[in-house]
Amino acid sequence: MPSGNVWVDIHLNDVLFEIQYQPRNGFGVSEIRPPGPDGYGLGPDRHFPKFADAQRHLERILSREERRATGRGARPKTPRRRSRQAMTLAAAN
């Protein structure tokens, strides 16, 4: 495993999805609408101890976004929005 933080950004339909690894916290998955600087620095929306669990969650939300964008399936619930104030607080810590 890597000794430091690692992340991969995935852009799909004007949404930023991120999967990351943190040595102390395991794996995390985030969904950021709209993508931009407000989405950086706060950590993942959900943590998972194992990569397979994070991967399944990411696949599920990517599939949901694809269905939403093509008009097939139910509309997803609105993910949390990240504010500049929250980002500033996270960066200060």
Image (cartoon, rainbow, N blue to C red):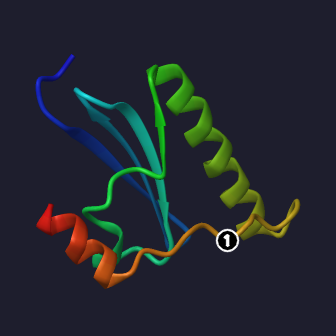
At x 42% / y 74%, what residue is drawn? 82
Q: What is the x, y in percent for residue 74?
A: 87, 63
Q: Is residue 6 above or below residue 63?
A: above
The image shows residue 32 at horizontal and vertical percentages of 47, 66
Secondary element under disc 1, as helix, strand or loop, is loop
Badge 1: few (under 14), some or many (20 or more) residues near its Cα, within 10 Å? few
Q: Residue at left 83%, top 70%?
A: 71
Looking at the rendering, in which quadrant would you find the N terminus? top left
Taking depth in this image into account, of 69 and 78 the one nearest to the observer is 78
Left or right placement of residue 40 versus residue 46 in this view:
left
Query: Which residue is most to the top?
Result: 1
**Disc 1 designates what residue?**
78
Percent position of residue 14, x then y: 50, 74
Q: Quadrant of the C terminus?
A: bottom left
Residue 77: percent from left, percent from top: 74, 66
Foreground: 81 or 33?
Answer: 81
Left or right side of 49 for 89: left
> For this view, does 5 lie left or right of residue 37?
left
| Rendering quarter of residue 90 | bottom left
The residue lying furthest to the right in this view is 73
What is the tally of numbered marks visible in this picture?
1
Residue plotted at (30% across, 33% down): 21
Identified at 32% across, 75% down, the residue is 86
Classify residue 60 by image quadrant: top right
Q: Is residue 53 above or below residue 69?
A: above
Which amino acid lies under the numbered mark 1 shown in the image of this protein? Thr
